[in-house]
Image (cartoon, helix red, strand yellow):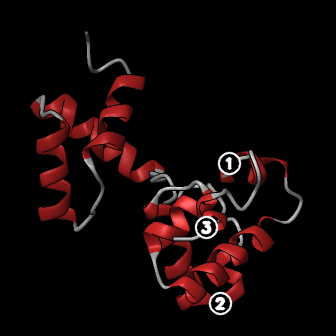
Amino acid sequence: MEKENLNCAFGEESYFERIRDSKDPVKIRLKIIEYLEKCKSISETARRFRVSRQIVRKWEQRYREEGIEGLKDKPKTPKKRRTVLTEEIVKLILKLRQEYNYGPRKIKQILQELYNINISEHPIYNVLKTNGLIKW
């Protein structure tokens, strides 16, 4: 292996230091992809750019699937939205708790079977807790 290949492509900086200070991280990621296509070795590319093989695979896969757009940073916002309960559902949850003293799991089951309402236990628990029906 050439001595040049063992040196980091960024000098003394690691990939993460370079990305953090970069105004255009896409160019840096594109260099990784170009080098990978040239040398055909994920391990060698990872060593050269001082990143894990997992990072190299991640950018390679994104580049194959989405092109240059795949090399841009993705938003870090959650993909799922929080469950918003209507007033009717909240009243139903409170009614089931007060009449039968059911817990979140049983209330969830009843909502699914009888009312065709599909929500997880956590929002049910939150409703019960905010209304003082769960005491710890």
Q: Nearest to the eye among marks 1 and 3: give it.
A: 3
Structural distance between the alpha carbons of marks 1 and 3: 15 Å
Could you say which disc has been placed on residue 5 in the image? 3
Query: Residue 23 vs residue 50: left or right?
Result: right
Q: Residue furthest right?
A: 23
Residue 79 visible, this orientation: no
Which residue is at 27% across, 63% downward?
A: 117
Camera-nearest residue between 40 and 129: 40
Q: Secondary structure at mark 1?
A: loop
Classify residue 67 by image quadrant.
bottom right
Which residue is at 10% across, 33% downward?
A: 100
Q: Residue furthest top?
A: 136
Point out residue 125 in the picture as x, y percentages from the top left corner. Answer: 30, 34
Q: Which residue is mark 2?
A: 67
Q: Nearest to the eye among marks 2 and 1: give it.
A: 1
Residue 25 drawn above or below residue 35: above
Amino acid of disc 2: Gly
Camera-nearest residue between 108 and 70: 70
Q: Nearest to the eye among marks 2 and 3: give it.
A: 3
Structural distance between the alpha carbons of marks 2 and 3: 26 Å
Which residue is at 67% across, 56% downward?
A: 8
Amino acid of disc 1: Ser
Q: Which residue is mark 1?
A: 14
Residue 20 drawn above or below residue 100: below
